[in-house]
Image: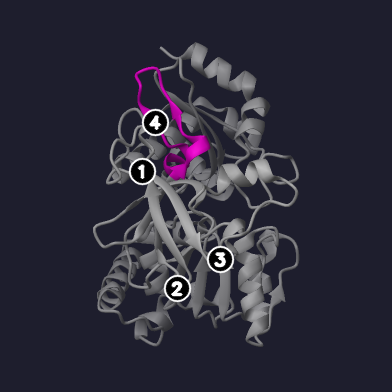
Amino acid sequence: MLSFLPLAHVFQHSMEMIAFAVGARVGYYSGDIRNLPDDCKILKPTVIVVVPRILNRIYDKVVASMKGSLVKRAILNLALAIKMFEVRRGVIRNDTIFDHFVFSKVREGFGGRARVFACGGAPLASHVMNFVRAALGCYIVEGYGQTECAGMISLCIETETVPCVAGVPIFCDHIKLSDASNLGYETLEQGGEICVKGANVFKGYFHNDELTKETIDAEGWMHTGDIGKWTENGVLQIIDRVKNIFKLSQGEYIAPEKVENVYMQSRLVSQVFLHGESLKTCTIAVVVPEEEELVRIARQNLGLQNLTMNDLCANKKVKQMVMEDMLQVGRTAGLNKLEQVKDIILTSEPFSIKNGLLTPTLKNRRPYLRRHFAKDLKEMYENLP
């Protein structure tokens, strides 16, 4: 197993404990995410614990590499169509002629022996999930959990292709949805707060009875603070965090993590922070572009060469190009007009644990992001037509 997520991330921690319990070997990366392909070639892992962002990057790079050649694009589309036909029938393998001649370089990028990707921390887009199954011939296990539930609450069925799915309850717990009408979810069919009861639920917070009582109700249900709903197939789908949801002046509730996860499917977006205010009619965003792709597209489409990332981020044409791509991705994913951003700023400074803009589990630290970009956010709202 390859380990490169922070061990403060309960998903990574749990997977390592399972590996040690069954006598598996765990290899640790070199400490620099940019060297991850080299680490994979050395360690040759069979199980890789990832967050969706890693798989999104692989997908974007493969698609981008095929855009310059009609022949390559035709071969890739044919290979994916045939492999996807097998995936839909439940056949996942990597020994076809297409695996040898089309997808071998992608597979070698992960060491050439990957069999299972364990993905958590955020929803994985269905088209990326199916691409990994088809191109790499690997199984994908998606999980939903929290530290308070020993790392796992539900597990995604291997054949599930609905995006943002957290799966079905694991064997030792029960899940229910509680009323969240105060957040705009009028019925439980629309969504509710996810509550968990079972052997995996913690007893309480150390020396903090008040917070324990807020989290675990009188009937023993732990309130996760996540909003979810049941799909037609009877599996859990995550929508957002209760504390992150905000309301615009029209009365529309916005689930920012849901929108951010959609925008991060854009090939030009590496990270995004969605912002809205109760006295405003629209949302805005701070975007960290995907550097390699932005440089390539800016040179190809706008004729901009030999510019630094700071210069590209300050360029109005570049900003418009990124925003148009985000809006197109949003339309494809079914975002409504109020969820779509009205303006963005580009920054070359990645959100990280080191600069305080990400949590140890790689989530956006929203209060810190709001303070860090307060001036930019204010100016964006002031300059909107």
Amino acid on which disc 3 is placed: Asn
Image coordinates for residue 106, horizontal then vertical, percent? 49, 72
Label 2: how many Cα within 10 Å (few below 14, some 14–19, many 20+): few
Which comes sooner in the sequence, label 3 or label 1? 3
**Residue position for label 3:** 200
Amino acid on which disc 2 is placed: Phe
Amino acid on which disc 1 is placed: Val
Q: Nearer the viewer, residue 146 or 288?
A: 146
Residue numbers of the magenta segment: 240-260
The alpha-carbon separation of the residues under discs 2 and 1 comes to 37 Å
The alpha-carbon separation of the residues under discs 3 and 1 comes to 38 Å
Quadrant location of the C terminus in the rendered image: top left
Q: Which mark is residue 171?
A: 2
Image coordinates for residue 298, horizontal then vertical, percent? 50, 40
Q: Secondary structure at mark 1?
A: helix
Amino acid on which disc 4 is placed: Asn
* As drawn, 111 above or below 344: below
**Residue position for label 1:** 329
**Extreme-front residue of the structure:** 218
Q: Nearer the viewer, residue 98 or 55?
A: 55
